[in-house]
Amino acid sequence: MAMMPDGRADAQVLRGHDTTAPVDFSADRIEVQDRADRVVVTGNVQVTQAGLTLTAQRLTVAYHDNNGVEIDRLDASGGVVVTRGNERASGSVAIYDLNRKLITMIGNVQLNQGGNRLTGSRLVIDLNTGRSTVDGSATGAPGTSTSPGGRVSGTFKVRQQPGQ
């Protein structure tokens, strides 16, 4: 993870994630809105895709029917957490655009990778490159907040020398 001069922070996370793998989900309630080409999933939502897990309270799945359902986008809200291995991102709202291979999180964002941690208002994870960017201020969704002073903050683990 690296801090940039413009107040952003960059990190490499979720590198090599297979965005074409099947998406499985479970929840307390699932409502199919066939005419709108979407599914609304609520209550203890859990989504998995190739080792990546997303949890939230509500999820809207946008899809199109191309001789079978193909998912375009996942919109999650309510304590959203995305994990894979020792990488964890959390925020108020998340949008996973499967076509563009981007995950955008807004509101009280925190990114953890091993012993490293970044906090801010908006996180964009590019699953094509594994590059993630945390911003300190964002034009957020309703009910989200920005970080204090519109800045990114972080803690980075320092390699320990033998005998310390």
Image (cartoon, rainbow, N blue to C red):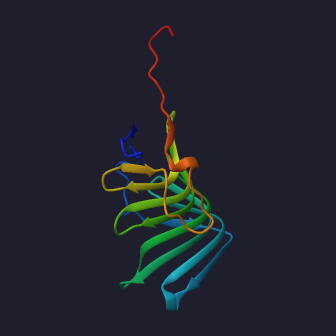
Above/below status of 95 relative to 5: below
Regarding residue 7, the answer to whether it shows in the image is: yes
x and y, in percent, of residue 30 in the image: 62, 77
Going by the picture, which residue comes out furthest to the left?
129
83 relative to 101 in the view: left or right: right
Going by the picture, which residue comes out furthest to the front?
149
Position of the N terminus, as image quadrant, is top left
Q: Which of the pair 49/72 is nearer the observer?
A: 72
Name which residue lies at 51% across and 81% down: 38
Q: Which of the pair 107/88 is nearer the observer?
A: 107
Task: Write down the quadrant of residue 144 in the picture.
Answer: bottom right
Regarding residue 86, the answer to whether it shows in the image is: no
x and y, in percent, of residue 130 in the image: 35, 49
Task: Write down the quadrant of residue 145 in the picture.
Answer: bottom right
Going by the picture, which residue comes out furthest to the top?
163
Name which residue lies at 52% across and 50% down: 150
x and y, in percent, of residue 129 in the image: 30, 52
Name which residue lies at 31% across and 56% down: 128
x and y, in percent, of residue 156 in the image: 48, 32
Q: What is the count of numbered marks?
A: 0
Q: Which of the pair 143/74 is nearer the observer?
A: 143
128 relative to 160 in the view: left or right: left
